[in-house]
Image (cartoon, rainbow, N blue to C red):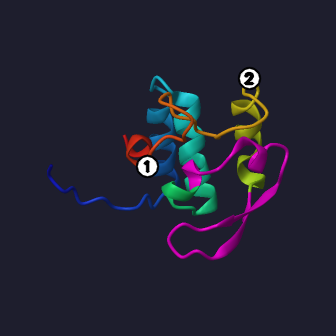
Amino acid sequence: MAVENVQPLRTSEEIGNVREALAQTNASERNLLLFNLGINTGLRIGDIVRLRIEDVRGRTSVVIREGKTRKARTVYLDAVLSDITNYLQDKDVKGWLFPSRKGDKHISTTQAYR
């Protein structure tokens, strides 16, 4: 597998272009929420996929323990609250925010990157 030189998104236009592209995918609702959580909270993808529905439903903040540093961190969800609410409209009360179709786990970081 070839290693690509991945650069961060630096402008609002670049972020808008990514959001537009994600809206065209099969799992657009999930993909947009993954992206918006990352952009607005600064969380690593490994921390995002480990979120549970009960952690975020109806909350404006959540305390997580970061996977890499093991530090507790308060994450404010105000900027993505409407995205979370829309995404959870037809979801169960408990479980993974981004469940895998295989078993009772969350999607992998590899799947999230795809």
Left or right of 106 in this view: 58: right
Which amino acid, mark 1? Answer: Thr
Quarter of the rendering occupied by the C terminus: top left
At mark 1, the secondary structure is helix
Q: Which residues are magenta?
A: 48-76
Q: CA distance from mark 1 to mark 2?
A: 24 Å
Label 2 packing within 10 angstroms: few (<14), some (14-19), many (20+): few
**x, y percentage for residue 84?**
72, 40
Q: Is residue 21 above or below residue 112?
A: above
Q: Any magenta on residue 53? A: yes
- Residue 54 appears in which quarter of the rendering? top right
**x, y percentage for residue 61?**
79, 59
* Residue at mark 2: 90
Q: Residue visible at 73% across and 52% down? A: 79
Q: Residue visible at 64% across and 40% down? A: 96
The circle drawn on residue 94 is none
Label 1 packing within 10 angstroms: few (<14), some (14-19), many (20+): some
Q: Residue visible at 76% across and 40% down? A: 82
The circle drawn on residue 109 is 1
**x, y percentage for residue 88?**
73, 32
Q: Is residue 84 above or below residue 91?
A: below
Q: Residue visible at 54% across and 41% down? A: 106
Left or right of 106 in this view: 92: right
Q: Any magenta on residue 71? A: yes
> Mark 1 vs mark 2: which is more N-terminal?
2
Which amino acid, mark 2? Answer: Asp
Left or right of 18 in this view: 64: right
**x, y percentage for residue 69?**
54, 76
